[in-house]
Image (spheres, rainbow, N blue to C red):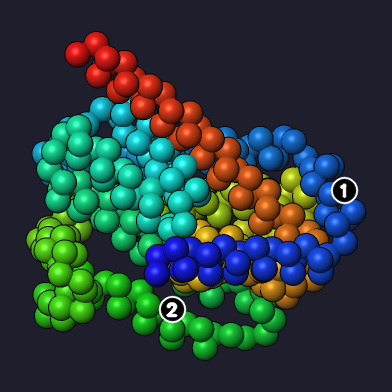
Amino acid sequence: MQQVLVIFKALVSLGLLAYLLVSVNLSTLVALISRISLIHYAAAIAVGGIAVVLSTYKWRVILRNEELDCPSAELLRYYLIGIYFNNFLPTSIGGDAARVYLLARRYGHRKKIFYSVLVERFTGLMALVFFLTLGVVWGPRVLGGDYSVLLGPVFLLGGGLFLIFFNRQVLARFVKMLPGPLQGYVEMVGDRLGHGIHFSKVGWTVVWTSVFFQFLGILIYLLVAQSLSLTVTFSDLMLIVPLVTLLTLIPLSLNGLGIREGGFVVLLSGLGVPASEALSLSLLYYAITLLLSLCGWGLWLFSRGGEAQSMDAQ
């Protein structure tokens, strides 16, 4: 069944990408990418690196709150390895599972490490919804006209996420809907969040790093857009990026590939951006994630080589 699901997702991704590539002028697409501003694109890559370091710092803060003091360099290595697995495994949580496995194998405390990764993800999602709300308010030109009707669903999404983990009764009902092995982990996350972490110094650190991380993610898209000389503003992207990111969470394709590109083509068309330029924007952003994945791949090979040498020495 799992293999059938993977094949289905691969077909969806390949089908969407093929449709988009056929729909645009390939020569125009190649010409756009070939004449990008290298300064802006290099800046986007640099901001991507900063975002990874920032998220690693947030992860370390959460772990230290659980009395697990892991070196920053080691966590950065595992974070990059996680990005590699996210991009080359047929599930977007593959990298998270890899981080939990690698860190727990070294330090134990699997539940605490699972909690730290889940909190990091959850707070990042909350920050994404925050920017989506700002985008709905300040980026009305994306879809044309007044679409304040979107405020309702956005607030429901944000409020639902908040209630699940900050209200005991709602959390208890949510936990009962989960598979048995996950119930204890999720219940522990809700218990920790509901007892002070969101009001403590640690909690505020997690909040500001989550918001700043999402800000950097939008900034990367803006820099890539500027490298292509697209007339897209930060306020436009405050709506588009969260919407597309949420779309990629739907488990219909391989890590959102194809859905992300289609989302940008559709949403940027409301700003008069041609499909070829919108597709170039999405592909160039994806290239940055692949570059970070290659760093993770190198670190993964290096760590496996080190483990093999250690076993031989024993």
> Of marks 1 and 2, which one's residue comes earlier in the chain?
1
Q: Looking at the image, is mark 1 or mark 2 nearer the viewer? A: 1
In depth, the one of 60 and 103 nearer the eye is 103
- Name which residue lies at 86% across and 57% down: 26
Q: Judge the density around disc 2: few (<14), some (14-19), many (≥20) Cα neighbours within 10 Å.
A: some
* Residue that numbered label 1 is attached to: 31
- Quarter of the image holding residue 56? top left
Amino acid type of the residue tagged 1 in the rendering? Ala
Compared with residue 156, is residue 139 higher up or lower down, i.e. above or below?
A: above
Q: x, y (%) of residue 231? A: 76, 59
Q: Position of residue 217 (x, y in %)?
A: 52, 51
7 displayed left or right of 284: left
Drawn side of residue 265 relative to residue 175, left or right: right
For the point 40% across and 69% down, the residue is: 1
What residue appears at the point 67 percent right and 68 percent down from the top-left corner?
A: 15
What amino acid type should be assigned to the residue bearing mark 2?
Val
**Front residue of 244 and 80:** 80
Q: Secondary structure at mark 2?
A: helix
Tag 2 residue = 154
